[in-house]
Amino acid sequence: MNLHEYQGKEILNSFGVRIQRGIVASNHKEAVDAAKQLTAETGTSWYVVKAQVHAGGRGKGGGVKLAKNLQEVESIANDIIGMMLITPQTSAEGKKVHQVLIAEDVYYPGDSEPEEYYMSVLLNRNTGRNMIMYSTEGGMDIETVAEETPHLIFTEEIDPAMGLLPFQARKIAFNLGLSGGAFKEMTKFVSALYTAYIKSDSSMFEINPVLKTSDDKILAVDAKVTLDDNALFRHKDYAQLRDLREENPIEVEANAAGLNYVDLDGNVGCMVNGAGLAMGTMDLIKQAGGDPANFLDVGGTADAQRVETAFGIILKDTNVKAILVNIFGGIVRCDRVAQGVVDAYKNMGDKINVPIICRLQGTNAKEAKELIDNSGMEIISATEFQEAADKVQEVLTA
């Protein structure tokens, strides 16, 4: 589950990570009130107005701007709230901005120049260990840094039995070129950041930039936090942070129905049971000359109601030109699935306006094929993988 910047910062702050303070606002009047409150609490007279959407690169799309007075806060907030923000990480349509974060100015003058760093905490799946990735090139896309100057990216892997050790935090501060007070502040920051990552059951923290202020404070200016959905039962308060407005509405509907669904850009809908079979089915569709329109796993039960719900969700995508139902009857019997497909087809009537290819294999597969063939419904049955692929190609080229 992705969080907004202000939500991620609240979690970081709760574990002792120093952050750029800010207040979220839903309209320009709230933005001005937030700016006034920040001035009273921090003394800041300049403010950063940040669009709150689940996408990076907000500054490139005009979603992050500096306001030098309250009038500019009101004007900028009024412009950003309600806009369709287009960034390198959004679709061409962009994402609608519902809120802005009014943040304090932390780039104030002092004895030294502020410096920006990159830091993230995530799982290294190759080694099965968490790692901290960091760089002196903060404020830039880490992909660009990796491509152009890979020697400026460092990683520190953490033994899960030992946790982050003090010497590792010091090593990170040293590799970032810090000394004196800033060195000590960075070791505290890294330690608190890793603690927050572990105790919040997150799958990724990305802080870009981490800032060394002109008076050697270390703080998180941005926060991209992704929580592990499977651990939300331990964090009921975190589960309430989910913003459905930021998610694909079809995926939200599927999740509410207990279906595992991921929206894709293709033209062939696929309905399967089991994630492995889903991956194989998507490969099959690709080899047949089509493109998968979705990943949809109906799970171990595929009764008429569940199949009907799945069909309805797939058909919400107007790009779908055919649907491939590929079910393996292990726990569930194929004839019951076939009856579910037939019943769902009857119930939906004219709502089904694309060809359906149905491959059922496993327990009672023969009976299932006979049931579909004798149903009188316009459902194309198949037995083998290649046969199903050929029929997908036929309906796409017809």
Image: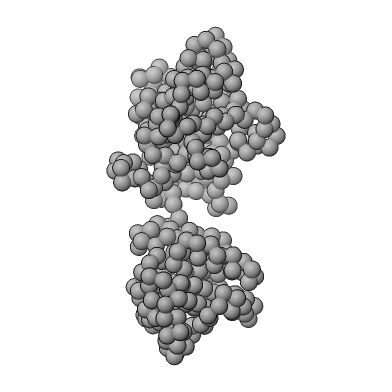
- Residue in the image at 49% along x and 72% along y: 326
> How are the colours assigned in the image?
one colour
Q: Does residue 83 show up?
A: yes
Query: 104 or 73, which lies in front?
Result: 104
Task: Give the image quarter of residue 347.
Answer: bottom left
- Depicted 203 relative to depicted 44: above or below: below
Q: Which residue lies furthest to the right in this view?
A: 148
Farthest residue to the front: give it.
161
Vertical side of 340 occupied by 183: above or below: above
Image x and y of residue 271, in percent: 47, 69
Q: Where is residue 202 in the image (x, y as percent from the top left)?
A: 42, 39
Corner quadrant of residue 287:
bottom right
Name the residue: 41% across, 69% down: 310
Question: What residue lies at 31% left-to-right and 46% top-to-bottom?
Answer: 233
In the foreground, 152 or 66: 152
Decide if residue 11 is on the left or right side of residue 181: left
Q: How many marks?
A: 0
- Tell me residue 238's x, y (percent): 33, 41
Residue 312 screen position, x and y as percent:
42, 70
**Residue 349 appears in view:** no
Q: In which quarter of the image is the C terminus?
A: bottom right
Going 40% across and 17% down the picture, which residue do you hit? Answer: 43
